[in-house]
Image: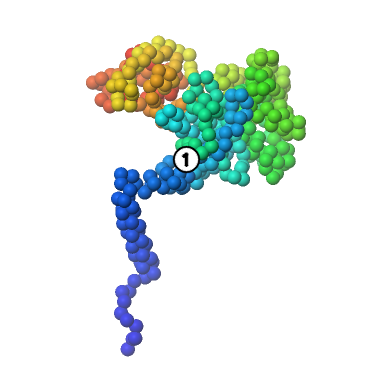
Amino acid sequence: MSLTADRPNTSAPERGRAERGRTQRLRSGLRGLLDAAVTPLTVDDVLDHFAPLRPAATGLRGRIVSVEPETADAATIVIKPGRDWAGHIPGQYVRVGVDVDGVRLWRTYSLTHGPRPDGHLSITVKAIPEGRVSQHLVRSARPGQMLQLAQAEGDFVLPQPRPGHRIPLLLLTAGSGITPVIGMLRNLFSRADAAAMGEAYDIVLVHSAMSRDEVIFGAELRAHAAAGRLRLIERHTDTDGLLTTDDLLAEVPDLDERLAYACGPAGLLDTLEAFYADRHLTLHTERFRPTVIAGDAEGGTVTFSGSSTSSAERAIEAEGDVPLLDAAESAGVLMPSGCRMGICMGCVLPLTSGAVRDLRNGEITVAVPGETDPAGVPIQTCISAAAGECRIDH
């Protein structure tokens, strides 16, 4: 006769699933009690307040660690990211959400660092006239301030060298266009195998700024040049004038043999792209504004309707070559935004009547009441301009 008590004939996997089910029910019940205790908030709201950088926080966030001046108009913002930060490749950019006067505005900045032992991020911002976010970050941001972050994006990155193969590079930058490139250089020259990296790349850097004092990271770039890590060609427009393609050919006669990267103002990039296209060469560019084509600049009256504006309706006059997003913000209309270059879809609003023109290709989008969708036609306000009178549901 067996002395073992009868028990259900369940397998170990079945018992494990049952135990996990009981644990999940217990957690769910406890979560419900805690949520009820902090109503109208939730437990996540409370945790986000006390531990905003935790992995489960609502949206990826970062805390400003320091604001370090670079020039009279530029500063490096060092940020401790939340634990959900997935890392980046030097040369990539990050979208940053900043609360300015109670309004969250998003802008895009290059990451200006290589590997950091502390795990922090850095962006370097140049304050531009009338730039609400750039002026705030350079002039007013302080350690401890919280920011919203997106994950790193972009393909403006260097190729990995093959063993025994040296890659000739030409880096063309102007103004704050040096920011993605400094991240690349810091990655190369701060590594344990920095000497090997120096042998793997033959780097020529052509950088233009208004004056010597306005060269962001000037001392660091000159130190790299003095150490023989790269050849630095500085162009100061207050004394040297604007860089031309003839200047470039004279300074870098072997440019046809170099892998080229460029970042800077739109005018410079437009010129370089045309120059490289004429020579049937490839140029990798990084832009933080869309390429705007020439075309009909009719413009018109844009009416914003909806509860998000300061009144039931707001009408502004918009030029035909100015993005609706910029025109609206200049007039004091609070607008959703993101990358500001037609990628992230963070600025989309419905066009309910009238016409707008895509500044990248000239295409016209029309909304006709009674014919198109009653909810409107979604448009990206950062790359669309008024093409006559139009109405947007805000």
Res. 105 image quadrant: top left
Q: Residue at x 36, y 15 (%)?
A: 316
Q: Residue furthest bottom?
A: 1
- Tell me the quadrant of the picture where the C terminus can be found: top left
330 or 191: nearer the viewer: 330
Along the line of sight, the residue nearer the viewer: 154 or 362: 154
Percent x, y of residue 234: 69, 22
* Quarter where residue 263 is shown: top right
State the residue position of label 1: 61
- Horizontal side of 345 relative to 188 (left or right) equals left
Q: Is residue 289 left or right of residue 375?
A: right
Above or below: residue 270 compared with residue 66:
above
Residue 309: x and y in percent read 33, 24
Please say if 162 is above or below 269: below
Residue 5 visible in the displayed image: yes
Circle 1: residue type: Arg
